[in-house]
Amino acid sequence: MLNASNVNVPRKWQICPREGAESRWHTLYATLNPEGYLVITRFTHQALGSPDSYQLLYDPERHVIGMRPARFGIDRHAFPARLRGRNGGRRISAYRLLREFGIEIYETVRFHHAQLDNSGVLILDLKDTIKRHKKGSMREGY
């Protein structure tokens, strides 16, 4: 049976804004998992010029990963960008990067403020990540 006693209770409604907060489909978005897979959205891939591969860079002083567009078979040290999912995202196998530079990732993380520098390199700051939650899970329980 329905509880009708709380139907007419005064409420302090707040409107959820639609604009302002961009979705991951319209911003630079990248994740990295413990197996070494870097995943970027189609938007991010297109912002980088839709290359077939990337050179993976690392700045050990600042703990920052860089992704520079490259051409597989032409540019040295180019890691292929393989299609990931139906929405046009890409997956780059970056396990070698983790091993080479001793980067330890224990759970899938999302780079909170991914950005492009002036030379077209995607900047992924390892000090500015958030835990990526699985589809359908809540960030905080109620």
Image (cartoon, rainbow, N blue to C red):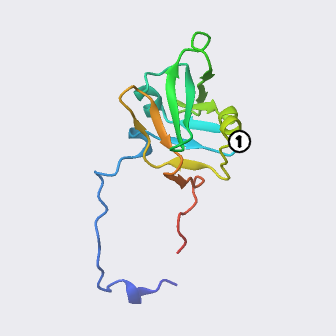
User: Which type of secondary structure does the marked residue at label 1 adopt?
Assistant: loop
Name the image quarter holding residue 33.
top right
Residue 14 x %, y %: 29, 70
Residue 13 x %, y %: 29, 74
Count of marks, rendered view: 1
Residue 29 x %, y %: 47, 41
Q: Nearer the viewer, residue 9 or 34?
A: 34
Q: Nearer the viewer, residue 6 or 81?
A: 81
* Amino acid residing under circle 1: Glu
Which residue is tagged 1? 35
Q: Point out the residue furthest to the top here.
A: 74
Q: Is residue 61 above or below residue 141?
A: above
Q: Nearer the viewer, residue 133 or 60?
A: 60
Horizontally, is 4 left or right of 75 in the view? left
Q: Is residue 40 above or below residue 55?
A: below
Q: Point out the residue furthest to the bottom here.
A: 5
Q: Is residue 11 above or below residue 138?
A: below
Q: Nearer the viewer, residue 69 or 104?
A: 104
Name the residue located 53 percent from the left edge and 68 percent from the top edge: 140
Crowdedness near tag 1: few (<14), some (14–19) or many (≥20) residues, C-alpha within 10 Å: some
Residue 63 x %, y %: 54, 44
Q: Point out the residue furthest to the front here.
A: 61
Name the residue located 60 percent from the left edge and 32 percent from the top edge: 91
Name the residue located 29 percent from the left edge and 85 percent from the top edge: 10
